[in-house]
Image (spheres, grey):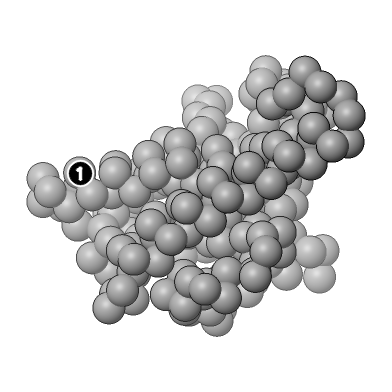
């Protein structure tokens, strides 16, 4: 039985959801960033980390999601098996990792992006992060025009986008109101019983 190490509010929410969609037995372990328990399985002290029964460890959300989708093809979460469908899955996984997720780092940790320790300097970094995140949400919103899901059918990529959309709803100016297609995807996912189960678990309910 695989074990997922996750932290509340993190992108580890995505594989947590996918494991519920798959429906096979798994264990979910809540950890704190940098905790001894997490460092024992991931020296970077980051989530998500997936451990298989034989001790094999995998980190990085995009890699874990791709692995789970192909480990359980019966769940139908790959987004398609043709060469171009696989390329689209990799494209959007890369977009979410390198563009969308990365745009939030200046918001979460502005001190990483300036040597000026003043509040004014850090506020400017946060503002720049907001602008960058809005750019990525605009890209995703345009892609979702006329679509229910990011790929051809519900997939791990939708689960990957979900925690980032939640960040945007909470942190960005306008709370994503200008991106109706993104909000529709959020609401579609939030209404899913498996997603609700995971959100309740992570909230300690």
Residue 152 appears in the picture as rendered: yes
In this view, 46 is above or below 149: above
Q: Residue at x 57, y 75 (%)?
A: 177
- The percent position of residue 39, horizontal first and vertical second, equals 73, 22
Image location of residue 103, percent across then percent down: 56, 42
* Residue 61, placed above or below residue 143: above
Q: Where in the figure is residue 141, as x and y percent of width and height?
A: 40, 66
Q: Looking at the figure, which quarter contains the C terminus?
A: bottom right
* Residue picked out by circle 1: 87
Front residue of 177 and 192: 177
Residue closest to the eye, 182 or 19 = 182
Q: Quadrant of residue 158?
A: bottom left
In the image: residue 83, left or right of residue 111:
left
Q: Is residue 156 left or right of residue 103?
A: left
Q: Residue at x 62, y 60 (%)?
A: 168
- Residue 16: give x, y in percent of width and height: 57, 54
- Would residue 69 be found to the left or right of residue 114 on screen? left
Q: Could you say whether the residue bearing mark 1 is in a helix, strand or loop?
A: helix
Q: Choose top left, top right, bottom left or bottom right for residue 104.
A: top right
Going 69% across and 26% down the picture, which residue do you hit? 113
Query: Which residue appears at 19% of the width and 57% of the height?
Result: 80
């Amino acid at each position: 039985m695989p074990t997922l190490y996750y932290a509340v509010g993190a992108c580890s929410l995505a594989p947590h959801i996918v494991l519920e969609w798959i429906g096979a037995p798994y264990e979910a372990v809540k950890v704190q960033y940098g905790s001894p328990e997490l460092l024992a399985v991931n020296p970077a002290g980051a989530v998500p980390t997936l451990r298989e029964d034989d001790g094999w460890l995998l980190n990085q959300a995009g890699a874990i999601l791709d692995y789970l989708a192909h480990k359980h093809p019966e769940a139908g979460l790959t987004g398609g098996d043709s060469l171009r469908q696989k390329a689209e899955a990799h494209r959007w996984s890369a977009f979410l990792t390198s563009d969308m997720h990365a745009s939030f780092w200046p918001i979460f940790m502005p001190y990483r992006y300036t040597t000026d320790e003043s509040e004014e300097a850090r506020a400017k970094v946060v503002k720049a992060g907001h602008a960058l995140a809005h750019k990525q949400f605009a890209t995703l919103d345009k892609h979702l025009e006329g679509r229910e899901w990011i790929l051809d059918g519900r997939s791990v990529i939708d689960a990957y986008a979900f925690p980032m959309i939640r960040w945007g709803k909470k942190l960005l100016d306008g709370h994503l109101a200008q991106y109706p297609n993104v909000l529709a995807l959020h609401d579609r996912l939030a209404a899913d019983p498996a997603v609700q189960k995971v959100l309740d678990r992570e909230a300690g309910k």
